[in-house]
Amino acid sequence: MSSEQEWPGQWLRGVLELCTLRILADGPTYGYEVSARLALGGLGTVKGGTLYPMLKRFEASGRVEIEWRPGEGGPGRKYYRLTEEGHRSLQDMSRQWQSFAQVIEQILEPAAHKEEQ
Amino acid sequence: MTGTPSPRKYRFERELAPHVDPVWAQELTVELRLRGASGKSIGETLAEVDSHCAEAGETAAESFGTPADYAQQLQLPELAQRETPQLMTVVPILGQIFGMLPILWAMPPLTQGEEVVIRTGQITMLGIVVAAIVLMTWRVLSLVRFVVRRPVPAVLCGVALVALMALAVGLLRTPLLELAPIPLLIFGVLMLAITTVWGVLRMRSATLSEDMVATPLENREAVNRRAESVRWVGYVPVLMMPVYTAALVLVLWLFA
C-alpha cells in the first residue's frame, strides 16, 4: 500500500480515531510522530488541523493522559499516553470496525455471498 | 503575511512559538482569547503548533489552516468567570464616573457664579452610563468579541449610546434640585481621587502573571518578566478618567 495514496475524506474521518488510538496503544508518543506513522501506514498526510483537535478530544474524554517533555535540541513535545478508558475504547472500536468491514465486504462481493448461502 | 513583522510587536509570539509565523501565532492567540480560553490553554496550543512545525518543516498555515478555523476546531474550554473580581472592576469605574460628572456639572456655574441645577436629563444620563458599564462588565467577553468581529456595528452602537445620552440631557429639562457648586466640586474631586487611588492600588497588587499565556515547559521567571513588561497597560483604564476629566475641565474653564 502506498503512503501517497489519497483516500476519500469521509472514509478517513471514519477511521482516523481508531487508527490513532491503535498507534497510541504501542506506547506514549507525540503528535508529529502519530502523523508520521499514519502516513507510513498508508493513510496519507493527516494535517495538524485535523489531528490535534482529535487528540484534544481524546484528552477531554479521558482516553489519553498527557505529559510535556523537553525536545531533543528542539521545542518541547506533548506526549499522549493511552489510559484504561482509551484501551477500552480501542477494543470496542476495533470490534465494531471488523464487523463493519465484514458487512461491506459481503455487500461488495455479492456472488461469493450467494455461494456461501 | 505582508513584509517583515515588527520585532517588538511580535516579541511574545517569537518567544512562545519561535518556529511559527508570529502573525499567525498572534491571530490564533486573539481567536482563542475571544473564545474565552485560559492563558495556560493558549500557551499549550502554541507550544504544540510550534513543536509540530519544527518537526514537520511546514508553516503553521500549511499544517493547521487559518487561525480562526483551528481555534474553532480545538473547542477549548472557556475560562470560568469569577463574580468578585468583576464586581471589584466595576465599582472603581462607577466611582470615577460619580466623581467626574459632579466636577463637570459644577464647573460652568462656578465660573458664572450661579447655583448648579440638576435636571431630569442629567439623572437619566447617569442611569444610562451606570447601566451600560454594568452590562459591559458583566458581558465583557461578548462585548470584546462584538467589537473585534463587527467593528462597524459596534461603533454605531457607541454613537447611538452617546446620542441617547445627549438627547436625554437636551430634552429632559425639568429641574430636580439646586446645589452650591463648591461642595459639589469638592465631592467630585474627592470621589475621583479616592476611586483612582483605589484602582491604582488594585493594579499594583494584582498578580498579572495569573492568566498570562505561558508554554508548559517555560520557567516562572520568563512568564513574570513578560507580565511585568505589560503591567502599564492595566493602568490605562484607571488613569483615563482623571485625565479625561482634567481635559474637559480645562476646556470648560477656557470657554467659560
Image (tube, coloured by chain):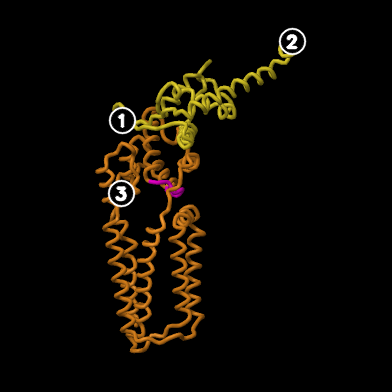
Out of B32 and A58, give the one closest to the viewer. Answer: A58
Q: Is residue B221 magenta?
A: no
Question: Tag 3: Cα neighbours inside 10 Å, few (<14), some, or many (≥20)?
Answer: some
Q: Look at mark 1 in the image and give the residue it sits on.
A: A70
Residue sitting farthest toward the top: A115
- B213 to A37, vertically: above or below: below
Q: Look at mark 2 in the image and give the residue it sits on.
A: A115
Mark 3: amino acid: Ser
Q: Dot 1: what SS?
A: loop
What are the residue bounds of the magenta stretch?
B33-38
Q: Look at mark 3 in the image and give the residue it sits on.
A: B209
Q: Dot 2: what SS?
A: helix
- B33 to A44, vertically: above or below: below
- Left or right, A94 with respect to B182, comes to right
Residue B131, position in %: x, y? 47, 68
Locate the C terminus of chain B by quadrant: bottom left
- Which residue corresponds to the image point at 45% horizontal and 49% vertical from the top-left? B34
Chain B colour as displayed? orange
Q: Is residue A20 visible?
A: no
Q: CA distance from mark 1 to mark 3?
A: 23 Å
Q: CA distance from mark 1 to mark 2?
A: 59 Å
Same chain for the residues under marks 1 and 2 in the image: yes
Chain A colour as displayed? yellow
Which badge, 1 or 2, comes first in the chain's sequence?
Answer: 1
Mark 2: amino acid: Glu
Question: Tag 2: Cα neighbours inside 10 Å, few (<14), some, or many (≥20)?
Answer: few
Tag 3, which chain?
B
